[in-house]
Structures are given as C-alpha cells and as structure tokens.
Image (cartoon, rainbow, N blue to C red):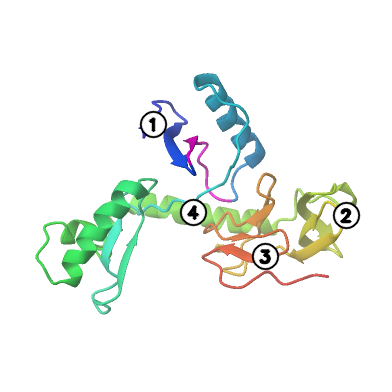
Amino acid sequence: MAISNSDSPYTFRFSKTDNIDFLIVGGQGHKVGQSNSQKEGYNKITDFAKKYFNVGNPDYRWSAQDYKSLDLIPYIGSLTSKDEKIFVATGFNKWGMSNGSFASLLLTDLILNKESKYKKIFNPSRGEIKDNIKSFVETNLNVAKELIKGKILLDEISLDDIKNDDGGIVKFNNKRVAAYKDIAGNLYLSDSTCTHLGCELEYNNADKSFDCPCHGSRFSYDGKVIEGAAKSDLKKVI
Ligand code: FES
C-alpha cells in the first residue's frame, strides 16, 4: 500500500478478487456532510487513477468513514474503568489494516490478563482532553456551527428542481425536507432533521444519501439509517 505526498493525499493498493486484479484508490477525505460535491470527489479520484495507472472507469466506488481520537492514537482497551470486561477498538484514523491487526493482539493480551506495555498508551480512558484542548474545542465548535447553520433555512430548492434519480433538501409545507426522486419519478420525502441530536442533514449527490455534518450519521434516500451515531430512521413526511 502506498500514499501520495500531497496536500490532498491519495492511497493506492492492489487487490486480487475472484482472480481479477483490482486497483483500489482512496482520497478526497472530508467530514461527513461537509463536502460541496461528493460526485466531484469521486471524479478527482478517477482522474488520478487514470493519470498514473493504465486503468479505465471504476467498477466500484464507495465512501468509508474513519474515526480519529483527539490525540490521533486509537482507543484500544476496556471501555471504561467500570466496564473492564467490555472492550473497544476504534479511532484507527484511516490505518485500519495495521491498527486493526495490532488491536487484536493487544485485546488478546488484555482479555488474558497479560501485562502489556501498550495498555496505558491506547487506554480509551486516558483522559487526553486536557492535553488536546484546542482540538477538543475546535471539534465541538464545528458541531455547534453545523447545528446552527442547518437551522437557518438558506439554500433550499423546490421539489420541482429535483430531477429523477436525484435528491436534495427542499422546502415543503414551509419545512426543510429530505427529498429524493427515483428513476421512475417516485418521490420519497423524509424529515431532514438527524435523529441523533437534531442537526440538519445535507444531500450527498454521489451516494444519494442524506448525511449529517455533526457526528457523521448517514441515511439512505428513503430515510433509513445506514451509519450511526443515529439509531432511528428519519420520520417520513409522505
Ligand atoms: S446530530 Fe446527526 S449525527 Fe449527531
């Protein structure tokens, strides 16, 4: 696996699946629900792959979500000091293949009550907030900004502006609504307020999902949860 040395880095590696050689290219990272055009992001990745490798259009494309801790060190260990027998491994910050393998080794030691010099470093309760107060404040200010921005009814389009097989956030009966029209023109309208903590969703024009800019929840075109933190589907409007 390799990573380009640029402001907006790309990663690339090869994979053999069902005896077919695939090139996997990643990049164009952004916060969920905070990209102006996900379609453009996919196009840039495709352009990069075509420029540097002898490949055509992609066979598959998808968005993955990466979580990172305040100090960029993963959380691996007991969930809290009170729940010592519940273990967590997260915050791999894009390095899931190596950190995931490492987590399996560390968690094995912890479950077997073996001593590990890594226990303290990766302890999920290490209390890194005081050492990373700037990052903590920035992250929470960003959530507050997105929460407020979403409540100010600004860029809504009307239902008539939505083409088939496309969607958007529209104004409907004086409310902000998540709308999607399928290829046959059937309309799906859901409440555009995230069921996690109430931020307003944004339309993802490449994956045709509704994404939350606050904590990364994602919902399908018809309002079903496809990624937490939210646990409940969006309310149907019609
Ligand atoms: S408010 Fe939407 S994910 Fe938290």
Looking at the image, do the residues carrying marks 1 and 2 touch, with CB atoms under 8 Å apart? no
The answer, for residue 55, to whether it is visible in the render is yes
Q: Residues within 10 Å of mark 4 (few under 14, many from 20)?
A: few
What is the C-alpha distance between the residues marked 4 and 3?
Answer: 19 Å
Q: What residue did someone put label 1 on?
A: 3
| Residue type marked 2 | Gly
Provide the secondary structure element on which disc 3 rests.
loop
Q: What residue did someone put label 3 on?
A: 193
Q: Earlier in the sequence, mark 1 or mark 4?
A: 1
Residue 141, numbered circle: 4
Looking at the image, do the residues carrying marks 1 and 4 touch, with CB atoms under 8 Å apart? no
Residue drawn at 12 percent across, 61 percent down = 116
Looking at the image, do the residues carrying marks 4 and 3 touch, with CB atoms under 8 Å apart? no
The answer, for residue 37, to whether it is visible in the render is no
What is the C-alpha distance between the residues marked 1 and 2?
Answer: 42 Å
Rendered position, 85 above or below 47: below
Q: Which sits in the foreground, 114 or 78?
A: 114
Q: Nearer the viewer, mark 2 or mark 3?
A: 2
The percent position of residue 28, horizontal first and vertical second, equals 52, 36
What is the C-alpha distance between the residues marked 1 and 4?
Answer: 30 Å
Q: Nearer the viewer, mark 4 or mark 3?
A: 3
Q: Which sits in the foreground, 209 or 175?
A: 209
Q: Residues within 10 Å of mark 1 (few under 14, many from 20)?
A: few
Q: What residue did someone put label 2 on?
A: 185
| Residue type marked 4 | Leu
Looking at the image, do the residues carrying marks 2 and 3 touch, with CB atoms under 8 Å apart? no
Pointer 2 residue Cβ closer than 8 Å to ligand 1? no
Magenta region, residue range: 19-32
Q: Earlier in the sequence, mark 2 or mark 3?
A: 2
Q: Nearer the viewer, mark 4 or mark 2?
A: 2
Q: Earlier in the sequence, mark 1 or mark 2?
A: 1
2 in magenta: no
